[in-house]
Image (cartoon, helix red, strand yellow):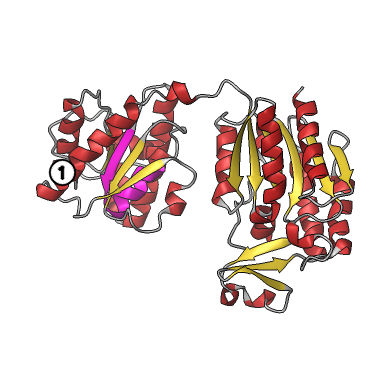
Amino acid sequence: MLGCFDSKAEDFEYLYRCLKELGAHVLTVNTGVRPSNINFTIDIRSSEVAEAAGTSLRELLNRGDRGHVIEKMGTGASLVIAMMVKEQRIHGIIGMGGGGGTYICLAGMQEVPFGIPKLCLSTVATKDLSRQVGTKDIVLMPSIVDVAGINSVSGLLIRQAAGALMGMISVEAERFKSSRITVGISMFGNTTECVDRCTELLKSQGLEVLAFHAVGIGGQTMEALIRDGRIHAVLDITTTELADELCEGICSAGPKRLTAAGDMGITQVVVPGCLDMVNYGHLDTVPDRFRSRQLYSWAPDVTLMRTNAEENQLLAKEISEKLNNAQGPVALMLPLEGVSLVSKKGGVFYQPEVDQILFDGLKSGANEQIRIEEIRANINDKVFADKAVEILLELLN
């Protein structure tokens, strides 16, 4: 149980009692920086949380900067929780609070692996907390009223929150661990045909397939699950998020995209899928410096921009450098007749000379450890999907 036991003492005392009544052994972590008057044992004191973040309660209080306090206590909470996870002391985590308390709580939950239940009862649960939640399987529960003492509304919701957490803990996670090889595959509307065919073939070989929509959070989640050891091989068909990171698109997965598989030493087959495009929202959201470029309305709220020669050179360099550092087997597959549905012959983004710059950069930048396959096909052609699966299975074997 994680939270600010100073300003929310009554609420956390009640949550503690609810959890105990449901049979939980409760470990408590206090992130409140002022004296706490509570009626339960604090296992990790706020002074320890502050020290984990390289500071002290005295320094935080003397500075008098609320934002700084929240940032440091969030950092400290994440480090403390990480150690508790390493010691295998946690089967579930719960917290609650307002804006600051929620930030600290979610920071701590970032260190808890997939499958361990995480619940935050929050006054700001209905706001956009995507950055704070990130790739984690966190349940956000609206508090309806402020977390400021027990009443007929807060009491019910706190009791339900405790029951929800204990209910999730009671689910046997081991039952859902696959005994098969699990393959992560990245997809987009412009590569769906390829991914569907690959998935069908992989499943026919007895492999489990996890598909991730390459819209930013999809790529981040795939990378996180790779690092958590939940994914054993990657068929990275759709690396478009790299183009969005380069050109300020809305589907960026951040600078660490395409690094987890290499760091973890697992097999990966990589395709420059949809690197012909950058994704923006409505047409009027396209940055001014790109307004004169070739734009295409994929949907009323999705505007695609065709990448140019310079951007393809930069993308090729980035991909080569990341794959060259991989600790496991790597194959790079090049669909010579188009990297997306709309870049095939007759498509709105059909520019084979620009695609060739990308292909040439990848071939010249890759080291000798990387297997390169050039396929005279569009990315969505059956022959390309079949070859991608064939190569992945070869590398796995």
Residue 207 against residue 315 in the figure, above or below = above
Q: Is residue 8 above or below residue 27?
A: below
Q: Quadrant of residue 105?
A: top left
Q: Position of residue 383 (x, y in %)?
A: 83, 43
Closer to the camera in the image, 352 or 1: 352
Which residue is nearer to you in this view: 10 or 278?
278
Q: Is 308 left, or right, of 111 in this rendering?
A: right
| Residue at mark 1 | 156
The local secondary structure at tag 1 comes to helix
Horizontal and vertical percent for residue 196?
Answer: 67, 43
Residue 170, picture quadrant: top left
Residue 287 vertical placement versus 255 (above, below): below
x 60%, y 57%: residue: 251
Q: Which residue appears at 85% of the width and 33% of the height?
A: 369
Please tell me which residue lies in front, 232 or 195. 195
Q: Crowdedness of circle 1 by 10 Å Cα count: few (<14), some, many (20+)?
A: few
As displayed, is residue 171 above or below residue 292? above
Q: Quadrant of residue 14?
A: top left
Please report the residue visible at 46 percent of the width from the left and 32 percent of the height from the top.
113
Q: Residue 65: tell me if it is visible.
A: no
Tell me the kind of residue under disc 1. Answer: Leu
Q: Measured from the top left, where is residue 203 in percent x and y?
A: 65, 31
Answer yes or no: is residue 107 visible.
Answer: yes
Q: Is residue 213 magenta?
A: no
Count the marks.
1
Q: Main secondary structure of the magenta part?
A: helix
Measuring from the top left, give residue 365's x and y in whole percent: 85, 47
Quadrant (top left/top right/bottom left/bottom right) for the N terminus: top left
In the visual, does 93 lie left or right of 150? right
Left-right relation of 153 to 309: left
Range of the magenta residues? Answer: 93-107
Quarter of the image that includes the C terminus: top right
